[in-house]
Amino acid sequence: MPTYQAEDLKQFGQHVFEAIGVEEEYARVAADALVRANLEGVDSHGISRLGIYAKRMNETKTINANPNIKVEKKGESVLLVDGDNGLGQITSYVAIQEGIKLAKKTGVAAIGVRNSNHFGTASYFCQKACEENVAAMAFTNSPPGIAPWGGIKPFFGTNPIAFGFPTDDEKPVIIDMSTSVVARGKIILAAKQDESIPKGWAIDSEGVETEDPNEALQGAVLPVGGAKGYALALAVEILTGVLSGAAFGPNVKNIYSETVEQANVGHFFILMDVEKFMPIEQFQKIMEIFLEDMKEMPKQDGVDEILYPGERRNREYTKRLASGITISEQVKEELQSLATAVQVDFPKERVNA
């Protein structure tokens, strides 16, 4: 399959966003978030999403390419952000930047975001916080994907939960997990690439487990851990939809549907300035000892190494930064078509030495 340098894809994404009216800074952030997902091996949330974002901003106008994002301070440590129907990566970037400033003053900041859209990987915003030595929790709701426990019709989104904790080597502990067995984006990607999905990922519209991604998209994704995952999805829905004042449950619109309604996705962030708890050097030293002690624990047969959450992601990032990002022929064709439509040069494939 075709392979491209990360920087080339990032510049391409930025130029596409700029061509459809996104401000330079925000275009750079949105493209960076997409390519970062590819670099970390989360291709379902990477550059393959550029086409649908562009369609929503440039054709159907169901996402605002140039939003007037409003940040309102609602309490000593509380921010409420109205994304003005902007792209989720952009509204969340603004929310995180303002939230970090507030957390540096008060120690902890809680930020609710409404009138937003799909924001990609939750981990991206935790990483941004960790760069400023701020620990983070990130949540978002999404279009219906998970049925209430015992039901067969989707009600909750796959509603990811992410945590980020800074370390002293720019490789933060990053926990990013959906409340479903798998992110719905992976099923969408499987359908796009005409691949089957593993059993145990989803049920069809009749409530029967299926390996057909198209049937799964007509049915529901299964929650992780059974009823526990359902409960987590419900909690995220309350934080991001109800408390933030965004849409919730079936009212959250899917960017892949033909609806002209705004998605009104909600996000929620909790940021904690490590320095308000202890000196950052002390925290990082304790983290180093903590992680080393954990990794040195006895291992199961066949296990060479115990990894902490985010470690595999960092290794994949380093690997793909050097070797390039591989995309499918179908995604390549979609991106080339998009490049032609907005009159932006498509990058050349990486040539292996």
Image (cartoon, rainbow, N blue to C red):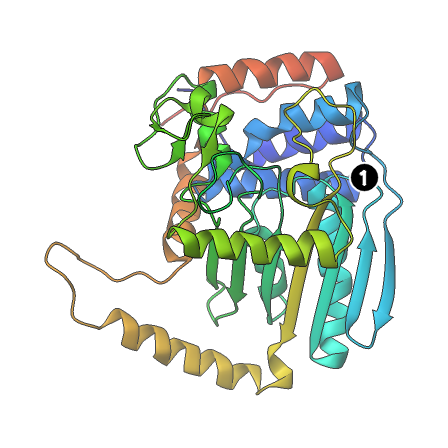
Q: Amino acid at mark 1?
A: Asn
Q: Where does residue 115 sit, x and y in percent of width and height? A: 79, 44
Q: Residue at position x 69%, y 12% from top?
A: 340
Quadrant for the C terminus in the image:
top left
Q: Where does residue 260 sit, x and y in percent of width and height? A: 78, 24
Above or below residue 15? Residue 333 is above
For mark 1, give the secondary structure: loop
Image side of residue 100 versus residue 274, left or right: right
How many callouts does the rendering have? 1
Above or below residue 318? Residue 231 is below
Residue 79 falls in which quadrant of the image? bottom right
Disc 1 packing (10 Å; few <14; some 14–19; many ≥20):
many
Q: Residue at position x 65%, y 25% from top?
A: 52
Image side of residue 219 versus residue 28, left or right: left
Above or below residue 328? Residue 235 is below
Quadrant for the N terminus in the image:
top left
Image side of residue 50 versus residue 44, left or right: right
Which of the pair 333/250 is nearer the observer?
250
Q: Where does residue 347 sit, x and y in percent of width and height? A: 58, 22
Image side of residue 264 versus residue 309, left or right: right
Q: Residue at position x 26%, y 62% from top?
A: 306
Above or below residue 320? Residue 131 is below
Which of the pair 164/132 is nearer the observer?
164
Q: Which residue is mark 1?
A: 85
Residue farthest to the left? Answer: 301
Q: Where does residue 161 sit, x and y in percent of width and height? A: 53, 56
